[in-house]
Image (cartoon, coloured by chain):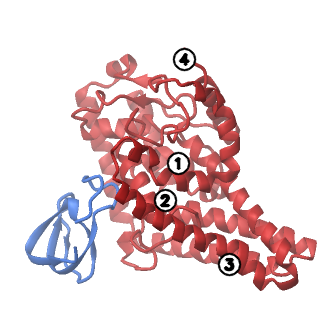
Chain colours: A blue, B red
Amino acid sequence: MPYGCRRGICFGCLTPLTYGRVRDLRTGEIHDRAGQMIQTCLSAAAGPLALDA
Amino acid sequence: MTVTPPASIETALDEDVGEELGAELDRIRSEILAARGADDARYIRTVIAAQRGLEAGGRAALAVSLFPPAWAAGTAMLAVAKILENMELGHNILHGQWDWMGDPAIHSATWEWDFLTPAEAWKHTHNHLHHTWTNVVDRDRDLGYVVFRMSADQRWRPRHLAQPLYNFVLAPLFEWGIALYDLEPDAVAAGRKTWRSFAADLTGFLAKGTRQLAKDYVLFPLLAGPSALPCLLGNLTANTVRNLWSHTIIFCGHFPGDVQTFTEERIEDETRGQWYLRQIQGSANIEGGTLFHILSGNLSHQIEHHAFPDLPSNRYAEIASRVRELCEKYGIPYVTGPLWRQYGSTWGRILRFAAPGQ
């Protein structure tokens, strides 16, 4: 999977979320839109999911 | 001047206060994130529309540029369009500042800009390396761009004597300099980057470069028919003007004399508060009006940009007064000044470190 700064600054880790839910570890926000680009370096799984990595 | 750590900051900012500053800045960030929405989206779409209008108008005028007023107007419009596209649009969109809209056309993953260096190459050296290692000697390659010596902690070499000349030559050719810099040839020589990776990046640059040169020096001149030559010269002038402007603004971001540089020891176990402190002290602002801020891509608010690189650029002006207040409250220097002074100070730094013994 691509990565950059690993601390949420650079957006170098953007990966499409194919399906499922992830949680933004900084804000607690849940992302679950299919195809949404997520910052994998600060996201955790919030259930089964698939990434287009 | 290198901070390792500076006595003045230690006395003014003990650990608790450093964390207080971090918390206050985090609070500003949260407020902006909560308020971010339709108004911001409208802003960027307006700038995009304006930029496209200027570019279309500029190129249309250059299509009949045998007529001198058309050449002048076309070149001016195209120069401003290129400046806007690179600074307020490209730099900020590629930073991910507008990814939150979920608009695939205005997103860091898809935007390609009217600048020689490919977006992918630039995002690596800028978003990742520069913004993580900001002003850390021997880690932040932007500290002199491998060519210039900008800190007493960078080893002097005889070639640095000529750095005022390098700066003079670089300015009109800035996009070429950045494209070459983004290939990271020094990293290959030092073994930090593989030849395979370099070859891939080089391929990307050759493809982008070919498209850029074909667009401005073949396609549009040909479309201009009898105005081909003035059109080509107008495009060349517009690119050069954009290079001169962006070189000026970008060099003023971290090179005015009072901006701090840091050693690797200083950033060991860096806390969030200390990270903010390094971003603030490692950056310089430029004073000006709203139009100036937009044309500089809001890099006139370099301090705020470095504290919050992923917040929408139109928000930096309102954040600036609060950041400045916090700096005053905690006794942190806030480096700013009018363009002529920041630019002069940057040249001063280039001249100062060109010589050994500094």
Dot 3 or dot 1: first in sequence order is 3
What is the x, y in percent for residue B290? Answer: 63, 56
Q: Which amino acid, mark 1?
A: His
Dot 1 or dot 2: first in sequence order is 1
> Callout 2: helix, strand or loop?
helix
Dot 2 corresponds to which residue?
Answer: B313
Residues flagged by tags 3 and 1 on a common chain = yes
Q: Nearer the viewer, mark 1 or mark 4?
A: 4
Query: Can you see residue B169?
Result: yes
Residues flagged by tags 1 and 4 on a common chain = yes
> Callout 4: helix, strand or loop?
loop
What is the x, y in percent for residue B330? Answer: 38, 30
Q: Nearer the viewer, mark 4 or mark 2?
A: 4
Name the residue located 68 percent from the left edge and 78 percent from the top edge: B53
Q: In the drawing, does residue A11 fall left or right of residue B337?
A: left
Badge 2: few (under 14), some or many (20 or more) residues near its Cα, within 10 Å?
many
Dot 2 or dot 3: first in sequence order is 3
What is the x, y in percent for residue B356? Answer: 56, 18
Q: Which amino acid, mark 2?
A: Ser
What is the x, y in percent for residue B14? Answer: 27, 24
Dot 4 or dot 2: first in sequence order is 2
Residues flagged by tags 2 and 3 on a common chain = yes
Contact flag, marks 1 and 2 (Cβ < 8 Å): yes
Chain ID, mark 1: B
Q: Between marks 4 and 3, how big is the CA–CA gap?
A: 49 Å
Dot 1 corresponds to which residue?
Answer: B301
Q: Between marks 4 and 2, how big is the CA–CA gap?
A: 36 Å
Dot 3 corresponds to which residue?
Answer: B53
Dot 4 corresponds to which residue?
Answer: B358
